[in-house]
Image: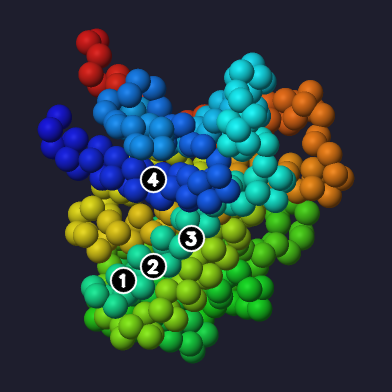
Amino acid sequence: MFTWLLEYFVPFIILISVIVFVHEWGHFWVARRNKVKVEHFAIGFGPELLGFSDRHGTRWAFHLVPLGGYVKMLGDADATSATADDQIIEKLSKEERQQTLHSKTPWQRIQVAAGGPLANFIFAIVAMIGLFAILGQPILPPVVGTIDSSGIAAKHGLKINDRISKINNEQIRCFEDILPFIRNGKHDVLTIKVLRDDKHVDLQIPLTIKDEKTGEIQRVKILGIKPNPSQEYEKLPLGEAIQTAFSTFWKMCKTIAVGLTELMTGQRKSDELGGIFAIGDMASQSAKLGFAGMLWFIIVMSINLGLINLFPIPVLDGGQILINAIEWIIGKPIPEKIQKYIFGSGFAIVICLMLYSTWNDLMRYKIFQMIRGFLPI
């Protein structure tokens, strides 16, 4: 049990606490700049474990369930800050009402909503600069770690532990260099040179397949391979570290956006969506790579959190930005009744996604089989 806590639970808590703190700090900092009173800065949910109150009356606290966090501002009906609590606001003085988020202009509310994702992005870029300049840029070597036996790569000869050195005569430095060849739509066939058992092997992998039923030619979106989790590091001069951090950030944003789009449009299998078990497993694997490995995973997850929160789904920051932008354009708030329906539907979407990703995790890690193994027969 103690070993499990050290290997999985502790890295997961560190990961969640850091990226959630950064995200909520962004909301908190922008809210304070706009003279909004913040009542509660929480890491986690449920009963409070420990905390303190600062001189501005903000309660800073860690809570029992470490699956997120929130910043609750004066007059908020709930932790999302999406709607106001009219009963509370009626009891406030005129001066206090001016300190509520809902008394601010749509533009100010947009700033507060955008503060969280922006903080995640700034943190990721600054952390990358420090990591690249001090310890080195982590490079995921182009080595096949796992392979889908039914995927296009396996069918055309690619094997586990193959190191891909060239694709279509272009040098492959890291695993991420493979992605553009698949996604840019310019290549119908990949000519791949791999190093296998100290020998060079040439492979041809087509990126188009013919549908057996319709005869339609379809483009392959994934090869069916995943990288070996081991990492290599290249230390960079400060100037190059800054430039590389910004370019890496942009590339990661595009990769994440494309991946999410492909999941939503059915171009990728929905069972690839992972939940808290998958995140915990990846955090554990990253922690085994040392401080640099863990920091890199925190950077990646910070960018993921920032991007996902910008989705225009009510209850997420992107949804609040959209609703406040509409109010700004039309010159008046969206009717409260309609807002309740909007936020209710957004909440349902988020819950469904969480449940589905958790179900994927239960299947992926065979949790039910593990539980059954502990039960008496």
The image quarter in which residue 350 lies: top right
Which residue corresponds to the image point at 48% horizontal and 60% vertical from the top-left? Answer: 121
Tell whether label 3 touches label 2 (CB within 8 Å): no
Q: Amino acid at mark 2?
A: Val
Secondary structure of the residue carrying numbered label 1: helix
Q: Image height check: is 319 above or below 166?
A: above
Q: Which residue is mark 3?
A: 121
Q: Image height check: is 178 above or below 16?
A: below
> Residue 228 at what x, y percent from top left?
31, 62
Of residues 104 and 12, the one drawn nearer to the viewer in this rendering: 104
Q: Which of pointers 4 and 1 lies earlier in the amino acid sequence?
A: 4
Tell whether label 2 touches label 4 (CB within 8 Å): no
Tell whether label 3 touches label 4 (CB within 8 Å): no
> Residue 219 at what x, y percent from top left?
67, 65
Q: Which residue is mark 1?
A: 130
- Locate the N terminus and report the quarter of the image it occupies: top left
Q: CA distance from mark 2 to mark 3?
A: 9 Å
Check residue 21 in the rendering and tell me which mark sits there, or answer none.
Answer: 4
Which residue corresponds to the image point at 31% horizontal and 75% vertical from the top-left? Answer: 132
Q: CA distance from mark 4 to mark 2?
A: 16 Å
Q: Which residue is mark 2?
A: 126
Q: CA distance from mark 1 to mark 2?
A: 6 Å
The image quarter in which residue 105 lies: top right
Residue density around tag 1, few if under 14, some if 14–19, many if 20 or more, within 10 Å = some
Q: CA distance from mark 4 to mark 3?
A: 13 Å
